[in-house]
């Protein structure tokens, strides 16, 4: 009896030890996994935003993103209707790049335009971002082998290029020249932070 109890007791004790050890180990692995996932996500964000930030100040970094987005459009226009998976992947990439870019402009640069009394320009650019979202919605609801897919992408590209030209050639240089060095440095810091949040 004593032996059986002892055996049972030992077994319980072993089970208990195993059970706690296992739970602790699982919890440890889960916590380690979560920490790794957070670290990996921060690393990914730094890598994504680092590409834009490495271009220099806020206007150069936004111009680099314009080039990157236009190159994505070109890749989309090189596909044919049989490449449906590639079209879906490129559209997803384009949507993410445009969302990140628009977020940073709408939270940092367009408010700075309003504060510099360029309210009409800020309103116009915000309205054009609305058109971008409309194009994305239209394409996200269109089959990637639809006959009108390429023409819609072409129209979308033209619209984004005109918007980018207006920002790069007229509105951003005027804002940059109108605020001091300190404000330009602040805009660069804020833009990098906004881009990092959305990366
Ligand atoms: Fe914009
Ligand atoms: Fe832009």
Image: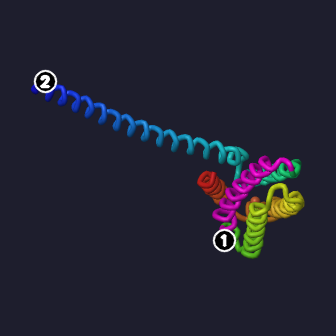
**Residue 52, placed above or below residue 161:** above
Horizontal placement of 165 versus 18: left or right? right
The magenta-colored residue range is: 82-111
In-front residue for pair 135/49:
135
Q: Is residue 188 on the magenta stretch? A: no
In-front residue for pair 84/28:
84
Label 2 element class = helix
Q: Quadrant of ligand 2?
A: bottom right
Farthest residue toward the top? 3
Please tell me the numbered disc located at residue 103: none
Q: Residue at x 65, y 48 (%)?
A: 49
Q: Are marks 2 and 1 in contact (CB under 8 Å)?
A: no
Q: Residues within 10 Å of mark 2 (few under 14, many from 20)?
A: few
> Which residue is denoted by mark 1 in the rendering?
115
Q: Residue at x 22, y 32 (%)?
A: 12
Label 1 element class = helix
Quarter placement of the N terminus:
top left
Residue 126: x, y in percent?
A: 73, 70
Horizontal placement of 121 versus 19: left or right? right
Q: Residues within 10 Å of mark 1 (few under 14, many from 20)?
A: few
Residue 106: x, y in percent?
A: 67, 65
Please tell me the numbered disc located at residue 3: 2
Q: Residue 107 falls in which quadrant of the image?
A: bottom right
Residue 90: x, y in percent?
A: 77, 50
Separation (CA) of disc 2 from disc 1: 85 Å
**Residue 116, placed above or below residue 24:** below
**Residue 32, placed above or below residue 92:** above
């Amino acid at each position: 009896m004593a032996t059986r109890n002892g055996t049972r007791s030992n077994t319980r004790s072993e089970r208990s030890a195993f059970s706690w050890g296992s739970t602790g180990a699982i919890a440890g692995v889960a916590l380690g996994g979560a920490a790794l996932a957070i670290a990996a996500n921060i690393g990914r964000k730094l890598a994504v935003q680092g590409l834009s930030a490495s271009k220099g100040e806020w206007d150069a970094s936004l111009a680099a993103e314009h080039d990157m987005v236009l190159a994505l459009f070109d890749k989309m226009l090189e596909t044919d209707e049989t490449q449906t998976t590639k079209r879906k992947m490129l559209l997803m990439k384009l949507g993410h790049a445009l969302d990140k870019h628009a977020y940073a402009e709408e939270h940092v640069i367009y408010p700075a335009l309003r504060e510099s009394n360029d309210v009409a320009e800020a309103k116009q650019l915000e309205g054009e971002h609305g058109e971008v979202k409309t194009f994305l919605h239209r394409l996200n609801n269109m089959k990637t082998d639809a006959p009108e897919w390429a023409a819609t992408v072409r129209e979308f590209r033209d619209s984004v290029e005109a918007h980018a030209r207006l920002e790069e050639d007229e509105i951003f240089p005027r804002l940059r020249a109108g605020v001091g060095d300190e404000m330009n440095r602040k805009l660069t810091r804020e833009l990098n932070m906004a881009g990092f949040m959305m990366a």
